[in-house]
Amino acid sequence: MSVEAEKPLGPIDTERPYKKLIDFRNKTYLAPLTTVGNLPFRRICKEYGVDITCGEMAMAKNLLHGQQSEWALTKRHASEDIFGMQICGSKIDQVVKACELINNETDVDFVDLNMGCPIDLVFKAGAGSALPESRGKMVKMIKGMQTVLDVPVTVKFRTGLKENTPTAHKLIPRFEELNVGLCTIHGRSRMQRYTKSANWDYIRSLKQEFTKIPLFGNGDVLSFEDYNNCKAQSGVDGIMIGRGALIKPWIFDEIKEQRHWDISSRERLDMLKRFCNYGLEHWGTDSQGVNNTRRFLCEWQSFLYRYVPVGVMEVVPQKLNERAPPYFGRDELETLMASPKAADWVKLSEMLLGPAPEDFTFVPKHKANSFEVMIYIYI
Ligand SMILES: Cc1cc2nc3c(=O)[nH]c(=O)nc-3n(C[C@H](O)[C@H](O)[C@H](O)COP(=O)(O)O)c2cc1C
């Protein structure tokens, strides 16, 4: 008798049981971060105690074209014990097909659908922050993903398109019907850049409407106090952290220990040394691997330099949307680490990776030092 014939008769079970259910609640979550949220950086965050990590956004179309660099984004490190990948696409069949491949070819614990990417190219194609505008398509896409994946589907979205007319609350009934594994809201609209604060009041009002599935909030958390306040005020089930982790990855340790860490420049250099080792392991030790490691280190340093050591601050904690005046550190290294100049970031890289090639120039992709142009570049 075949195995099939032994199954009890009855209706076909259309809801695939998840292989692995994840309890996301009350865990810290490192945001998906294009370019800078690479595997070596995530290893550093794991060392400082983050619970959930997510890979950089991958485009469904590129995955279907078999682009190696896109598939590399789904790679996890052994230390990433709750690891998801993020997918972005505008066509249902492409996203679902890509998820089928992800299910067969990769080892991830969840797949997050990007519904927040603001950039024109993605938006105009109907992906990212445009998806919630086509509600029917969005629902079909998530259903399709759930059908082919053995792991939970999660979603990340913004408050809406325009700052003064938030629309995310209209999505809640859909997400609850679909029983998605986790919703994360970045408390900004598509049009809103990083100059204005995230809207945690709106996040709180949203949380009051969520009854069945967990909701995480995201936006502007740079200290354990920010974390505590945002969590208590909004009642969310957890917090996702992006730039706060780039500027000071030890924020996860501060949250766990509930204290400020006056980390020394030596300890910070050690962290960079570990990053370089992980980088060489990940990108290779040949000249291209070293070059990549240097480039991604500089890319990260374009955020790291904004950290102001606890010991030199008049008022703690530092706030994400406040710019500190230039200062001298407590030693030469601390001063160098605070430099906003790309040439100094290369100098730092030379302390760890040896001299940069003569033709090496560095222009940060994310231009973190300019708030006006602070948009994230996806593709
Ligand atoms: C450099 C950079 C890259 C980003 N890449 C992505 C991405 O790939 N996918 C995504 O959903 N959000 C991306 N974001 C948005 C963040 O995940 C997060 O929602 C946003 O930065 C707000 O959180 P924060 O205030 O903690 O930084 C990116 C943000 C930055 C600064």
Image (tube, rainbow, N blue to C red):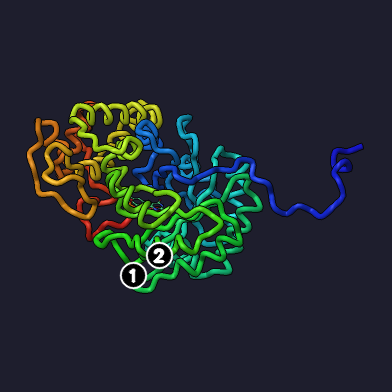
Residue sitting at x 42%, y 58%: 185
Label 1 close to label 2 by CB (< 8 Å): yes
Q: Note whether residue 296 is visible.
A: no
Amino acid type, residue under disc 1 in the picture:
Glu
- Image position of 138 (left or right of 219): right
- Image position of 150 (left or right of 41): right
- Residues 93 and 24: in front is 24
Q: Note whether residue 306 is visible.
A: yes
Distance CA(mark 1)–CA(mark 2): 8 Å
For the N terminus, the image quarter is: top right
Could you say where residue 367 lies in the image, as x and y percent from the top left? 24, 51
- Residues 94 and 321: in front is 321
- Residues 224 and 99: in front is 224
Question: In the orientation shown, which residue stands out farthest toward the left?
Answer: 328
Disc assigned to residue 9? none
Could you say where residue 340 lies in the image, as x and y percent from the top left? 15, 45
Up-down relation of residue 274 to residue 70 (above or below): above
- Residues 204 and 284: in front is 204
Q: Which residue is mark 2?
A: 159
Q: Secondary structure at mark 2?
A: strand
Q: Which residue is mark 1?
A: 163
Could you say where residue 339 lies in the image, as x and y percent from the top left? 14, 41
